[in-house]
Image (cartoon, helix red, strand yellow):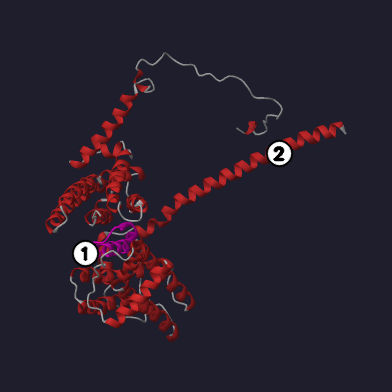
């Protein structure tokens, strides 16, 4: 609009008024407003979503529920519980185990970020947080393995217990890798799946190594 | 005078207001462009990750075969996926080599040491050799150097993987010479093909060969001792001794490595 090029508002005219948007009829369904529902309902909705994703991880099928509504509550809970269980071993030593918790935490999140960046650089169509969500949720089998290892270690720390722990950890490691591959590999170009699966394999291998070499003091 | 003063104040206020608005705009623009360049950095790396699995496999195998033609500059693929995965694999192998020990309490520190060692070697030695190549007029770019050295770590991964599972002292020396030697020869041949002049070739390739072979020796022998030194200084003398991989090291080299490693660990 060339005619409007020289229009200007002088600075001493105040601009004020009232902006109102005419509202139509009040919308009949009040489900969109979740402010009025009881707190229990809100929490249960989120818990149910997290629980549903746990079930998806334990029985990995090619569904997009994990990807569509991503959330990071599950990975946070899993990461914190894994780091807490890995820390308990050094409770009697001189250092307070603080750095150990932080190291596990940092390694899990740093590893997940590196894998996500790698899959994005290889041409993946998945978003950053979706990938973090999947990788975090697939730590669930390894957390279960950690729990089993701690229970086995309560009974004793001999060769038999080592063999049991080895079998459990290897099985859960395979489960984790397969579960995350089932979700993540679809977002890659078909001939590059191996390039994305390999760092996931290394990531869960390192976590499994941390679980297997855990010895309580 | 009154008018001038009036105008002066009003002008001053208006000018201050405009300057503040300008500054806000500049800061906002700077932050936005910083954020944009941070995001765009990922796209800068994208061409270096454009590989197929077949290509990665071929380059891994090629990294063990020294080229014969050194009068013609050899092609180096400027790719970062393979080297990055090899560095992470080396970290995983280093951690796997410590699974036989029962005294691991602070896995986090060991992990930090492993990651620091491997990445430090890859990035540090690449930069150093790139700097030497710049001095010796060699035709190689930084990405190509990173890629060459990264693929050269494939020999290290193989050697360490074998010798962590089969604890034979002489087997390690054979692997060190053969496998380490082959990958070093390949890197040296590629660099020689891209450098002119005998002195320059000697400097560049001698440095790279020495660093590469010594790193493998270090990883096998001294790395465990440095870790043992860290555990000793942190946990006190009442922990059982760390179960090392190489059990029959000759006494002289043992003592030398021990003292240097303890000195290094104490200064850490």
Would residue B265 be seen by someone viewing this image from the given angle? yes
Packing grade of label 2 (10 A; few <14, some 14-19, many >=20) is few
In this view, A166 is above or below A127: below
Q: What secondary structure is the magenta-colored segment mainly?
A: helix
Nearer-the-camera pick, B112 or B156: B112
Q: Give percent across and percent down for residue A15.
A: 64, 24
The secondary element bearing badge 2 is classed as helix
Task: Point out the image quarter for the C terminus of chain A.
Answer: bottom left
Is residue A5 rendered to the left or right of residue B132?
A: right
Kindly give the residue lying farthest to the bottom in the view shown. Answer: B198
In this view, B219 is above or below A206: below
Inter-mark Cα distance, 1 to 2: 70 Å
Which of marks 2 and 1 precedes in the sequence? 2
Is residue A56 rendered to the left or right of residue B45?
A: left
Q: Give percent across and percent down for residue A26.
A: 41, 14
- Circle 1 sits on which residue? B100
Is residue B50 rendered to the left or right of residue A215?
A: right
Give the quarter of the image for residue B18: top right
* Residue B88 belongs to the span the image colors magenta: yes
Nearer-the-camera pick, A158 or B130: A158
Q: Chain of mark 1?
A: B
Q: Residue drawn at (47%, 79%), measured in percent from left and top?
A: B136
Kindly give the residue lying farthest to the left in the view shown. Answer: A160
The residue range painted magenta reads: B82-111
- Circle 2 sits on which residue? B16
Kindly give the residue lying farthest to the top in the view shown. Answer: A25
Nearer-the-camera pick, B78 or A145: A145
* Residue B38 belongs to the span the image colors magenta: no
């Amino acid at each position: 609009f060339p005619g409007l090029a020289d229009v200007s508002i002088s600075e001493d005219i105040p601009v004020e008024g009232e902006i109102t948007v005419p509202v139509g009829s009040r919308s009949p369904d009040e489900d969109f407003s979740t402010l009025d529902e009881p707190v229990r309902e809100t929490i249960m909705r989120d818990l149910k979503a997290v629980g549903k994703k746990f079930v998806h991880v334990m029985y990995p099928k090619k569904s997009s529920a994990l990807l569509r509504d991503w959330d990071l509550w599950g990975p946070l809970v899993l990461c914190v519980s894994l780091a807490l269980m890995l820390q308990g071993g050094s409770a009697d030593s001189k250092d307070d185990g603080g750095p150990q918790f932080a190291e596990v935490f940092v390694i899990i999140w740093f590893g997940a970020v590196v894998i996500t960046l790698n899959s994005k650089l290889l041409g993946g169509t998945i978003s950053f947080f979706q990938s973090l969500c999947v990788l975090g949720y697939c730590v669930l089998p390894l957390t279960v393995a950690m729990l089993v290892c701690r229970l086995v270690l309560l009974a004793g720390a001999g060769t038999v217990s080592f063999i049991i722990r080895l079998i459990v950890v290897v099985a859960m490691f395979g489960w984790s890798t397969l579960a995350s591959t089932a979700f993540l590999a679809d977002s890659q170009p078909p001939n590059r799946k191996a390039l994305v699966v390999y760092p996931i394999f290394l990531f869960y291998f390192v976590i499994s190594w941390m679980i297997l070499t855990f010895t309580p003091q | 005078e009154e008018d001038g003063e009036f105008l002066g104040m009003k002008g001053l206020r208006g000018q201050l207001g405009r300057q503040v608005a300008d500054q806000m705009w500049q800061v906002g623009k700077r932050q936005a462009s910083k954020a944009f360049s941070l995001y765009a950095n990922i796209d800068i790396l994208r061409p270096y990750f454009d590989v197929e699995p077949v290509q990665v496999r071929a380059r891994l195998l090629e990294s063990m075969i020294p080229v014969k033609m050194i009068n013609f500059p050899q092609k180096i693929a400027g790719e970062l996926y393979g080297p990055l995965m090899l560095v992470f694999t080396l970290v995983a192998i280093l951690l796997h080599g410590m699974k036989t020990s029962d005294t691991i309490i602070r896995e986090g520190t060991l992990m930090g040491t492993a990651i620091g060692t491997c990445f430090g070697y890859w990035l540090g030695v690449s930069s150093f050799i790139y700097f030497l190549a710049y001095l010796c007029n060699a035709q190689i770019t930084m990405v190509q150097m990173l890629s060459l050295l990264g693929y050269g770590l494939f020999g290290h991964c193989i050697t360490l993987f074998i010798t962590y599972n089969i604890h034979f002292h002489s087997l390690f020396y054979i692997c060190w010479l053969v496998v380490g030697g082959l990958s070093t020869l390949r890197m040296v041949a590629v660099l020689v093909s891209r450098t002119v002049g005998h002195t320059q070739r000697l400097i560049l390739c001698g440095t790279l060969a020495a660093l590469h072979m010594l790193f493998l020796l270090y990883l096998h022998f001294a790395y465990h001792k440095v870790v043992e030194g860290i555990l000793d200084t942190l946990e006190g003398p009442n922990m059982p001794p760390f179960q090392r991989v190489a059990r029959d090291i000759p006494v002289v080299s043992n003592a030398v490595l021990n003292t240097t490693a303890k000195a290094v660990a104490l200064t850490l």
